[in-house]
Image (tube, rainbow, N blue to C red):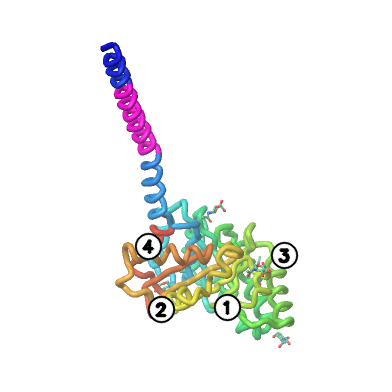
Amino acid sequence: MSDTSEKHVSKRECLKSTRSRIILAIVALVVIIAAVVPSVVVTTLHKNNSMGPKAKVFVPLYVYPAPGAWTPLENVISAHPDVNFTVVINPGNGPGPDSLPDANYTREIPVLSSYANVRLLGYVYTSYAKRNVSAIRNDIQTYADWQTNSSNPNLAVQGIFFDETPQQYDAQTLTYLQGLTDFVKDLEGLGPDKFVVHNPGAVPDSRYLATADSTVVFEAAYSTFQERQGAKLFTSIQDSNRSQLCAIVHSVPETIEGKSLRGLVKEVRRVADEVYITHLSTDYYASFGQKMNEFVGLMAA
Ligand SMILES: *[C@@H]1O[C@H](CO)[C@@H](O)[C@H](O)[C@H]1NC(C)=O
Ligand SMILES: *[C@@H]1O[C@H](CO)[C@@H](O)[C@H](O)[C@H]1NC(C)=O
Ligand SMILES: *[C@@H]1O[C@H](CO)[C@@H](O)[C@H](O)[C@H]1NC(C)=O
Ligand SMILES: *[C@@H]1O[C@H](CO)[C@@H](O)[C@H](O)[C@H]1NC(C)=O
Ligand SMILES: *[C@@H]1O[C@H](CO)[C@@H](O)[C@H](O)[C@H]1NC(C)=O
């Protein structure tokens, strides 16, 4: 009997310890699940929500500043103080022939430049480095003189946007472009930044990159952007020189909105530090697309 009793006791003890092991295991499992699952869920959500690196909104503002015409842009700029804007102004294929632009410009430029999150650039074309250097210098000097000539510290640009810069390397062209950048950097009246942007419209010879603070490596339609993405054209420059790059995608189909516009903004942000996306397919810089606010909202995300 005692044997049986002993056996019985030991069996119960055995049962007891099995049960407590099971309970322990369940508790451990619950603890593990509680610890791991939320972080997995949060990571997944975070991944889905992440828009990648932040980028500045780049606006080629070739809209004539008739009273109220720049208001949609000013509204979206003041609605997003956490987003930086680089805005190119172009009074007359450059600063125009006179020492100051017309009264609509002299009224509106100070309004734009008074926003802390705006950097204004003056448009100057170079005709693929064929334009007379003294004509270009005159244009740059005219922008730089606006402040003193108008006695208005806010009537000013903080750098120059050089349009039509070349892609193919040429030692003389490099000297030409570097000379213009040196001219800008030495001038008073172009703000603290004296920011220089080149627009070859496509990825240029990499030896040109260092002559500008930023380079437009893509300026084309949505369909072309999709082709270059597909061809992995941007992958080589993605991480290394992103901070020096600008990308402009126009002619985005109206159907690209909501989730798919979000996807596009994310893709372009990965390529470049300055981004402009518009659904307009003709005269895309002469007015604002209807989805401008949605685009800027996604840049803020
Ligand atoms: C915006 O500009 C400010 C001031 O220059 C800078 O500190 C900040 O990093 C910029 N943000 C982005 C996203 O470029
Ligand atoms: C300003 O713009 C308005 C509207 O386009 C135009 O009628 C007016 O002549 C412009 N003013 C100047 C000084 O050019
Ligand atoms: C550029 O223009 C200036 C002034 O009109 C002229 O003196 C100079 O010869 C021109 N330079 C070239 C390379 O054509
Ligand atoms: C203002 O513009 C006039 C006309 O171009 C020019 O002669 C003058 O030197 C400029 N004044 C200043 C202070 O920049
Ligand atoms: C990055 O830019 C520098 C000059 O700023 C250039 O020397 C270098 O080749 C660039 N890298 C790539 C991958 O384009």
Residue 235 tag number: none
Residue 223 tag number: 2
Residue type at mark 2 is Ser
Q: Is residue 19 highlighted in magenta?
A: yes
- Report the magenta residues as a range: 14-35
Q: Quadrant of the image for the C terminus?
A: bottom left
Residue 200 tag number: 1
Query: x, y percentage for residue 206?
Result: 65, 74
Instruction: Give the spatial CA distance, label 1 vs label 2.
Output: 19 Å
Q: Nearer the viewer, mark 3 or mark 1?
A: 1
Residue type at mark 4 is Arg
Q: Nearer the viewer, residue 63 or 21?
A: 21
Quarter of the image for residue 257 reads: bottom left
Which residue appears at 70% of the width and 81% of the height? 173
Q: Secondary structure at mark 3?
A: helix
Q: Is residue 25 highlighted in magenta?
A: yes
Instruction: Give the spatial CA distance, label 3 vs label 2.
Output: 41 Å
Q: Is residue 173 above or below residue 71?
A: below
Quarter of the image for residue 291 reads: bottom left
Q: Secondary structure at mark 4?
A: helix
Asked whether disc 3 touches disc 2, contact meaning CB atoms under 8 Å apart, the reply is no
Closer to the chain start, of discs 3 and 1, is 3
Is disc 3 surrounded by few (<14), some (14 to 19) or many (20+) residues within 10 Å?
A: few
Residue matched to label 4: 262
Q: Secondary structure at mark 2?
A: helix
